[in-house]
Amino acid sequence: MAHEHKPLFDEAIQEMLNSLKTEDEMTEKQRRIMEAAIALFAEKGFHASSTSEIARRAGVAEGTIFKHFKTKKDLLYALIGPMFIKFASPLILKDVKQIINEDLPAEEVILKLYRNRLALLEENWPRMRIVLQEALFHPDIMNALLENLVKDARGLAEASVKNRIEQSEFRPLPVKAITRAIFSTMLGYVFFSKAFPDEYANEDKDKDLRDAVDILMYGIANKRPDSL
Amino acid sequence: MAHEHKPLFDEAIQEMLNSLKTEDEMTEKQRRIMEAAIALFAEKGFHASSTSEIARRAGVAEGTIFKHFKTKKDLLYALIGPMFIKFASPLILKDVKQIINEDLPAEEVILKLYRNRLALLEENWPRMRIVLQEALFHPDIMNALLENLVKDARGLAEASVKNRIEQSEFRPLPVKAITRAIFSTMLGYVFFSKAFPDEYANEDKDKDLRDAVDILMYGIANKRPDSL
Amino acid sequence: MAHEHKPLFDEAIQEMLNSLKTEDEMTEKQRRIMEAAIALFAEKGFHASSTSEIARRAGVAEGTIFKHFKTKKDLLYALIGPMFIKFASPLILKDVKQIINEDLPAEEVILKLYRNRLALLEENWPRMRIVLQEALFHPDIMNALLENLVKDARGLAEASVKNRIEQSEFRPLPVKAITRAIFSTMLGYVFFSKAFPDEYANEDKDKDLRDAVDILMYGIANKRPDSL
Amino acid sequence: MAHEHKPLFDEAIQEMLNSLKTEDEMTEKQRRIMEAAIALFAEKGFHASSTSEIARRAGVAEGTIFKHFKTKKDLLYALIGPMFIKFASPLILKDVKQIINEDLPAEEVILKLYRNRLALLEENWPRMRIVLQEALFHPDIMNALLENLVKDARGLAEASVKNRIEQSEFRPLPVKAITRAIFSTMLGYVFFSKAFPDEYANEDKDKDLRDAVDILMYGIANKRPDSL
DNA sequence: TATGAATGAGGATTCATTCAT
DNA sequence: GATGAATGAATCCTCATTCAT
């Protein structure tokens, strides 16, 4: 089941990515600039963050920013580009595919997937927040987001869902509906944990997640999961 | 069951709201300005939209904007303020409470609620989009959003959910988990319909919604709803 | 002898010209900006003159410049555009044609032409200087210069020269050579008067011009003009 | 006839010249920098050419430029300085004087001179173009140009012209007028050959020059040259 | 009420130049 | 000798806002 991979991003960005693979080879100041930009873009948005403020926060001269990033927008791309690699690179998706294809009960597969994605999200939250925020305003980013993160994931999910429907593991509902339920559960979980961070602090996070998956499984499994 | 009502918004905004209740008494130009601003803010975001472009689009002089709205930010508030009224005013919430309290099967209550909220959302999408987008960057708006839209709704929902759990209509799960599932289902539905508008065009939108509710009910109801 | 007229300038500039015909309707500040720019561009060149210095010299805020001229380059075009009209508009060239076609001895025709052009040049020297200087660096201006000023003039001159050769008034030399001599004489006169302004001050300017024409006529006329 | 020689240039430049006489001892990179600068300055002018572009074009690091030339302006001087030597150094002018003093008919002297100067101009065109262009904006260069190239040449010319008037070889006109005619003829020739390069390509260039000189001689010689 | 000319602070970006390596 | 990262002043231009009309 070969998975043809489309351009992760459009031209300009693709180019950026190439020059970036080497995020480790960055100079000290370059890293400081990126960190400052991540913090600011996440907090106030791309358009509301000025290069002068980024420079101040990074402790560099304003000109220095432009030595490393041709353009303010290039800086944005440099920040979010790696997110597409982390979340959607074929290498990483293999990880996901592996989870999906392990011969496990659906419930565990879904839990594992959620945990995997949530961990990734948590580790990269400020950057991922920027991706999500700016996708609303930059059609190119929105495109990359839908094409590379959403569609890919959806494709993988739908294939697996279809399979489990055929095996009577899932209820005979439209594939799309079940897939959407799986997404929605995670989306809602993320939303609540960000909107009410106090309630999702610390220990019982996973309990919350398991509750969510429990409801989901009751909703989509052919047999009531407790009978399992 | 008295419902204590908090300030819909914080000071500055509250003030705006007062002067605005009268959205009908607006002059022609004022309305044109608001419409132009709605279109632009929705499309490019608040910070990326200039007052000069708003003026051009509205066909008024730039100064005219400031005759009606002291500040660009006041214009933003004037646009989104009404959303809080439409979605959360005590008057309107009565509508929601009524649906909740009608003695109907949970499934129908939820469907009705979803339809009610979705219709409201659809009618006011550009403004609502602005609220959601800008909440990400303006803490005051985020606050108003959580306090007035989310918390209120959550409050109402949790009360009702708790009730139905006690009546063994819903499974004995944490109230929070069920409430979240109800939200998630709608959130996911909205997300998919915006992300893949082609698939959610026209007629079978409601079928999609019913599928989603079906899964939700399987997930949270004590008895498999197919017995219904 | 209809004279087909080509575009005076390319698109961008043509557009400028239209909006400029009305150089009289300019506001006070607009005029001050143009005057300051003329002085600075003439003195230091376009690239070496900053908008901030123009603003200071004009006594306006820097932003004001850009309210009136979209771009620094537009300001340049606005300054030199009128030169093309003054020197090459069909209306004005009629003036030149009239001189050429009056039935006068060549010597007087040439003298009249020189005086006419020199007066025009003197009246508009700072702007014309800018045209000549900047043509060296901006291919579009160079083009407009050659197409509209030089080629037109050359066309008119060659027609007349050819005629006078046929009538044995001028020596049977290549038309191009005689035309070039006529141009060169004027070019050299202008050069000297600018390079050694002291020598060309005041009263005997015209004597200098007559000397130059005298030599020219000896050079190109079939009979020695000394009979005059 | 001792020829008092003024400073070729003013202080700063003179100093540069000294350190430069050694244009042959330049390192490889130094030469590449100069070549890149010549090309760029000629094409876009001094102010519009950035050191970074010069460095890129020369294939050196930006810092390298400043190792060899203290200042961007020093680089300019280093480029044009040699022009003053080539065109006006006593050594070279001896060449000119020799031509002038050979006992030849004026026509041939002038032709030889023109050819000599034109050849020099053609060989050094890009640099000479820079001198002429930048003289418009840098008073020091303009001064050097007038003092060293124009005045010297004019001085030589006027002496010779005066002589030939006294010998009735040239018409009894003001010396200045004849000298100016001689300059104008060459100036016009150069102007036309640069403005309409197509017409002055290849073979018949010299025919054009001879035509120009022919007209000039008719204009200034006491006897019609064809009688010679 | 509405205008639009005017403002000047602030925007992103480029510049010539320096300096540690 | 050569590098290229770093600088910060200066560049052109846009911004939200004011105010006389």
Image (tube, coloured by chain):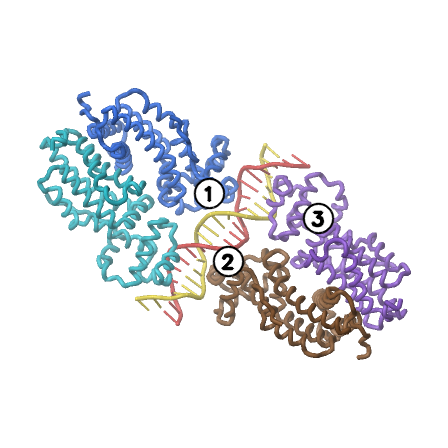
Chain colours: A blue, B cyan, C brown, D purple, E yellow, F red
Q: Position of residue C127 (x, y in %)?
A: 60, 65
The tag on residue A55 is: 1
Total numbered labels: 3
Q: Is residue C9 left or right of residue D118?
A: left
Chain that bears disc 2:
C
Residue at mark 3? D78
Q: Quadrant of residue A128?
A: top left
Q: Chain of mark 1?
A: A
For the residue carrying disc 3, how many other residues have a C-alpha within 10 Å: few (<14), some (14-19), or many (20+)? many
As displayed, is residue B77 above or below residue B147? below
Q: Position of residue D48 (x, y in %)?
A: 60, 52
Q: Give the number of the disc on residue A12.
A: none
Q: Amino acid at mark 2?
A: Thr
Label 3 and label 2 in one chain: no
Q: Secondary structure at mark 2?
A: loop
* Left or right, residue B17 beside residue D95: left
* Secondary element type, mark 1: helix
